[in-house]
Amino acid sequence: RKEVEQDPGPFNVPEGATVAFNCTYSNSASQSFFWYRQDCRKEPKLLMSVYSSGNEDGRFTAQLNRASQYISLLIRDSKLSDSATYLCVVKVPRNDKIIFGKGTRLHILP
Amino acid sequence: GAVVSQHPSWVICKSGTSVKIECRSLDFQATTMFWYRQFPKQSLMLMATSNEGSKATYEQGVEKDKFLINHASLTLSTLTVTSAHPEDSSFYICSARDLRTSGVETQYFGPGTRLLVL
C-alpha cells in the first residue's frame, strides 16, 4: 500500500459547484497533514494545514479522520482559478519525512 | 512570507554534462533543505535531505555520487547532477525549513528548475 494515495482525477467541475477530494495514508503514526496546491509547471504552495478538529479557510474546509486514516478537502463555490493539482501531504514520524501524494487534478469549467 | 529562490530556472544541456542548481533561502536561515524531483504527472519524490555543515542524507535509490549536494551555509544548498543523461530530465525543486518557525510544520518551496538533457 502506498504511503499516501489520492485519486488522480481529473475532476471536471462547473464553476460554482462544490467539490471534495479524499486522501488516504498508511502510517497510523503520521503526525501532520497538509493540502498543497500546484499549478502547472510551478512549485507546490501550501493551501492549508489539516487539524484534528477540522478547519476552514474561506471556501476551503479540511477534515482529518484518524480512525479511517484519511483526510479530505472540500471546496465550495468553486472558481475558475481553483483549477490546479491538489497534493495531499503527510508528515511521518520516520525522520520527520514529508510524503507527497501524486495529486488530484481539478478543472473548473466555465 | 519566507522566500526560497532557485537558479537556474531552466537548463538545457548535452548528455554527459554536469549541471549545478542553487537553492537559496532569501530572508531566513535554514539548517535543513530538501531536494525533490518531479516527473510529468508524478508526485514530488524526495531525493535527499541537505543539512548545513554535514553530509546529505539520500533516499533509497538515489545515487549520492551522481547527485552531489553541498549545504555550505545556512542560506545556500546546491545540487549538482553529474554526467547528466536524458533520463535525468525532470523538474527539480528545493525546499527549506525556516529555523525561526521550526515548530510550525511548513516548508517553503523554491520555484523549481527544469532540466532537459539532450
Image (spheres, rainbow, N blue to C red):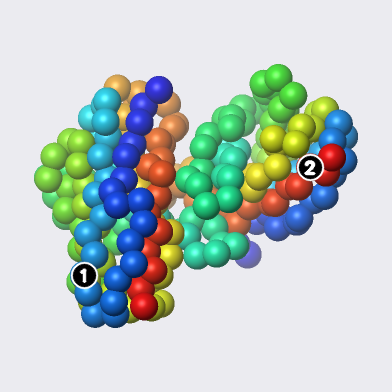
Nearest the eye: A106 or A3: A106
Nearest the eye: B30 or A98: B30
The residue labelled by disc 2 is: A108
Which residue is rendered at x = 79% and y = 32% of the image? A78
Q: Is residue A66 left or right of residue A34?
A: right
What's the CA distance linking mark 1 and mark 2? 41 Å
Which quadrant does the C terminus of chain B fall into?
A: bottom left
Q: Is residue B67 left or right of residue A6?
A: left
Task: Please name the amino acid that badge 2 sits on.
Answer: Ile
Which residue is rendered at x = 58% and y = 50% of the image? A40
**Residue B43 seen in render:** yes
Nearest the eye: B106 or B21: B21
Q: Position of residue A3 (x, y in %)?
A: 57, 57
Nearest the eye: B105 or A29: B105
Task: Please name the amino acid that badge 1 sits on.
Answer: Ser
Q: Position of residue B96 (x, y in %)?
A: 33, 39
Which residue is rendered at x = 53% and y = 34% of the image? A46
Q: Quadrant of residue B15?
A: bottom left
The residue labelled by disc 1 is: B18
- SS of the residue at dot 2? strand
Name the subunit of mark 2.
A
**Residue A92 seen in render:** no
Above or below, A3 against B66 in this view is above
Which quadrant does the N terminus of chain B fall into?
A: top left
Q: Position of residue B54 (x, y in %)?
A: 14, 49
